Amino acid sequence: MKLLRCVPVLLLPALGLQAASGPALVGKATTSVDGRAIFTMAPPTDTFPVGTGTVYLVARNGDISQLWRTHGWYAAEVFLTNDGEFLVRLGGSPDHTTQGAAPLAVAFYRRGRLLKQYTVEDLVRDPKNVAALSSADGWRADRDRSGPVRAPAPALHLEREFHVTTIDGTFYRFDVTTGAIIEARPALPPREGWATPRDIDRLCLATLLVELPAPLAEIDGLLGLPPGTRKPVGPTADEDVQQAELTSPNDPKGHYALRLTLTRQPTPSVTSVALIYVTPEGYRFAYQPSDRITRALPAWRAELREKRRTPYEQSEAVLQEIKGLKD
């Protein structure tokens, strides 16, 4: 799922306006994740020497209404919540940076009113990295593909958080509704042993074959979790829902995880488990077995009991059988 879609807005003035330095500033439109809210960005012109922006909301019947406007800045990259209420701005045009001031990194708005903003120096903790930046967005880890930090592009998370990682490896979580920093911590390093595509196929089957409830301490062996799996630590309440990450959460395209319901009575146990796919924005999609797999499950479960196999062993045997049929 793509969070940000930018297309030229042909009706906006002065599309070819050139900044004092850097690329031409052009009119753009950005939609929210579900497409209901639209933000149009007009660059500075001779008539209007500062950038202007307008948020529109698309009704169910297709009618478009204006929600609010902003002026005084231009940014090529913004993020908009589905209700059009909140906007996150990344950076801005170089010709509107105050002389000698640190460049803007991120700013948060509600209906055009500035809530909070941060400069690059506010977020990048190592001054050497700030001094070495050669571009307006060079402070972001996702822009430096040759650097030591691997990070996904900045994104809204479940509509109320904004996530971004800096070039010096600091991961930030912001509250979109206030602009406050919720968390600032070292970015998660790449891990060895993440699940392969074949592991994901096998885990699809293993989660359907496992008998629940099962002791949390035994779930690794029952399902055959890959060594890199980031496992849940156990229930923090009588019943708790947690994720076990199977592939890297830093993947900009999204990642796979197990969604587990845990209980601690009488001992920590797993009462439900499902394979899910998590988008960069935090939306979760559960795996649904095909009719063919659903019909085959009773026979596979009977074979599991007859041969005293774990779900891991049975799912491995099924994959081998399927591979043999294809060969």
Image (cartoon, helix red, strand yellow):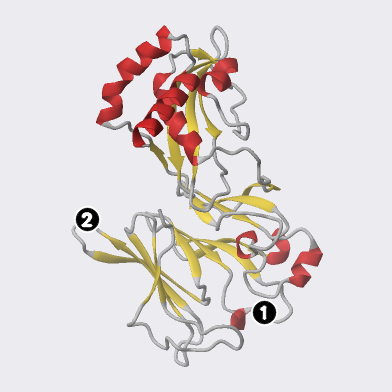
Answer with the quarter of the image where residue 102 lies. Answer: bottom right
Assign a secondary structure to mark 2: loop
Crowding at mark 1 (Cα within 10 Å: few <14, some 14-19, many 20+): few
Visible in this render: residue 167? yes
Answer with the quarter of the image where residue 246 lies. Answer: top right
How far across and how far down the image is residue 252, in percent?
52, 53
Q: Disc number at residue 98?
A: 1
Residue 176 or residue 300, whichever sits in front? 300
Q: What residue is shown at x 41% (from left), y 75% (from top)?
A: 28
Residue sitting farthest toward the front: 327
Assign a secondary structure to mark 1: loop
Answer with the quarter of the image where residue 322 lies. Answer: top left
- Callout 2 amino acid: Arg
How far across and how far down the image is residue 109, in percent?
51, 61
Camera-nearest label, 1 or 2: 2
Please give left or right for residue 175 compared with residue 317 in the image.
right
Crowding at mark 2 (Cα within 10 Å: few <14, some 14-19, many 20+): few
Visible in this render: residue 239? no
Query: How far is mark 1 from mark 2, CA to CA?
Result: 42 Å
How far across and how far down the image is residue 243, in percent?
52, 32
- Judging by the rendered image, the residue that carries numbered circle 2 is 60
Quarter in which the C terminus is drawn: top left
Residue 231 or residue 137, whichever sits in front? 231
From the viewer's perspective, is residue 79 above or below residue 218? below
